[in-house]
Image (cartoon, rainbow, N blue to C red):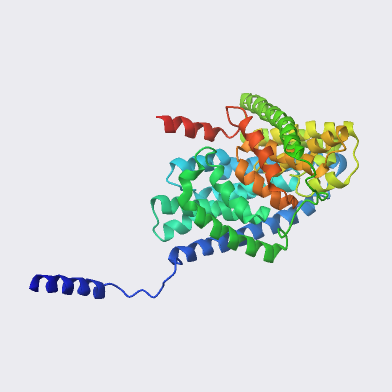
């Protein structure tokens, strides 16, 4: 009996020796850090967007033949920034650092990425601000994690949550942005980063609120499509057929980009010469087809409300693919998700010319989903993003289209670091 009493006494003393906790909830210190990261992400995205809008408005003054020297000069300046400040890398570098560099994104790349991308996007390059925002907010997550001495998966989760906050701010889709930050790292093993799901959700929600409050955009659909009602079960089949057509275009885009990459690699010149040449080429495309200028945020809406002829739509699609390929391979900085959505919307309008009896909304959304899923291999987040951005209430046809684009994508991915991950995991 004495021995039992001694054991009970030791147990009670151990309990009393521990600090008293008054928090009966899952809520913890980490939640506050995730929320703080989301607030930082929303503010950073807001400042970036305000500066981008200001520069875009100023550079939009140069039209007609003036876009050629304007884009050439902006390309040259962006190249000089990269040459002297440092190469910030592309989406491949972000994926590799998250996967193999213990989740660390280096903030020292941010000045070069921000300055060069602002010039490239504002002047009219066919790349969007999602990649720069992901880099800057993701590295902010790394910095905040290091500040509180996080290590391992906790540090990686902070970086991923930062990426999600930047992506969400631009697209106004907390769920889609969170899943994209996980899915883009590796299309087959996104569940490996399950510990980052809740941090990404929390940071995305706070970033969304801050960005919407400051910029007043991102609430509700961005692109206004005609209302859609599912009339027959064949709509699923139509979504798959349209997705196959978009996947073929996605293949064309991938190999067009690879071709230009080989051509620019053969040029043994400094980066600023390549960016200048890229600017000249883009300037000529924009001179003849002004709607191909910029990354497509507003241009998709213009495309949907305009009554372009079939031949003009086909021409726009071809030259927009060329513009994106040149922008990506000549050293210009930015993201290619919204430009791909533009290509998908154009293809949907082309198909609708041949089959006007089928809903325009179904045709356009299916093509937008498939081409992006084919190139980026992110079917889950693509589905949720498009449902949010277009207000397309029927979720399942978009999912069918996204999965079609994903499963018919080329074996060698467009984002080469996804292939490197597979190889390294096999070792």
Residue 14 drawn at (x, y percent)? 22, 71
Relative to 171, say whether 277 is above or below: above
The residue closer to the viewer here, 365 or 106, is: 365
Relative to 237, say whether 178 is above or below: below
Residue 95 drawn at (x, y percent)? 52, 41
The residue closer to the viewer here, 306 or 396, is: 396
Image quadrant in which you'd find residue 396: top right
Judged left or right of residue 238, residue 355 is right
**Quick check: can you spot residue 410?**
yes
Residue at the location (60% across, 37% down)? Answer: 377
Image quarter (top left, top right, bottom left or bottom right) of the N terminus: bottom left
Residue at the location (50% across, 56% down)? Answer: 198
The residue closer to the viewer here, 219 or 234, is: 234
Image quadrant in which you'd find residue 204: bottom right
Residue 158 drawn at (x, y percent)? 48, 55
The tally of labels here is 0
Relative to 139, say whether 276 is above or below: above
Judged left or right of residue 364, residue 328 is left
**Quick check: can you spot residue 343?**
no
Residue 146 drawn at (x, y percent)? 42, 56
Image quarter (top left, top right, bottom left or bottom right) of the C terminus: top left
What is the residue that sits farthest to the left in this orientation? 2
The residue closer to the viewer here, 300 or 326, is: 300
């Amino acid at each position: 009996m004495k021995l039992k009493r001694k054991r009970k006494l030791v147990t009670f003393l151990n309990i009393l020796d521990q600090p008293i906790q008054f928090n009966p909830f899952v809520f913890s210190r980490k939640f506050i850090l995730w929320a703080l990261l989301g607030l930082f992400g929303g503010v950073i995205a807001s400042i970036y967007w305000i500066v981008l809008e200001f520069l875009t408005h100023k550079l939009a003054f140069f039209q007609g033949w003036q876009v050629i020297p304007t884009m050439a000069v902006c390309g040259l300046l962006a190249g000089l920034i990269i040459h002297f400040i440092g190469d910030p890398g592309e989406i491949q570098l972000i994926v590799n650092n998250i996967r193999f560099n213990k989740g660390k994104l280096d903030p020292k790349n941010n000045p070069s990425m921000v300055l060069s991308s602002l010039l490239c996007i504002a002047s009219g390059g066919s790349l969007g601000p999602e990649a720069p925002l992901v880099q800057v907010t993701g590295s902010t997550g790394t910095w905040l994690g290091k500040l509180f001495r996080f290590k391992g998966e906790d540090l990686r989760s902070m970086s991923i949550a930062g990426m999600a906050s930047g992506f969400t701010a631009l697209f106004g889709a907390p769920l889609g942005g969170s899943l994209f930050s996980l899915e883009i790292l590796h299309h087959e093993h996104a569940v490996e980063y399950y510990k980052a799901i809740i941090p990404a959700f929390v940071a995305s929600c706070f970033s969304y609120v801050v960005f919407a409050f400051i910029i007043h955009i991102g609430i509700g659909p961005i692109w206004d499509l005609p209302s859609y009602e599912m009339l027959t079960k064949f709509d699923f089949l139509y979504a798959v057929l349209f997705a196959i057509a978009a996947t073929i275009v996605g293949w064309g885009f991938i190999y067009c980009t690879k071709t230009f990459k080989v051509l620019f690699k053969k040029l043994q010149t400094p980066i600023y010469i390549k960016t200048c040449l890229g600017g000249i080429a883009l300037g000529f495309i924009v001179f003849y087809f002004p709607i191909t200028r910029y990354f497509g945020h507003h241009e998709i809406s213009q495309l949907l409300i305009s009554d372009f002829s079939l031949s003009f739509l086909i021409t726009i699609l071809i030259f927009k693919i060329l513009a994106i390929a040149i922008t990506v391979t000549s050293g210009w900085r930015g993201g290619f998700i919204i430009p791909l959505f533009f290509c998908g919307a154009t293809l949907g309008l082309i198909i609708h010319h041949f089959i006007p009896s089928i809903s325009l909304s179904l045709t356009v959304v299916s093509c937008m989903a498939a081409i992006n899923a084919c190139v980026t291999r992110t079917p889950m987040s693509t589905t949720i993003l498009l449902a949010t951005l277009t207000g397309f209430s029927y979720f399942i046809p978009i999912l069918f289209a996204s999965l079609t684009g994903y499963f018919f994508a080329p074996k060698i991915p467009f984002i080469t670091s996804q292939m490197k991950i597979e190889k390294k995991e096999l070792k």
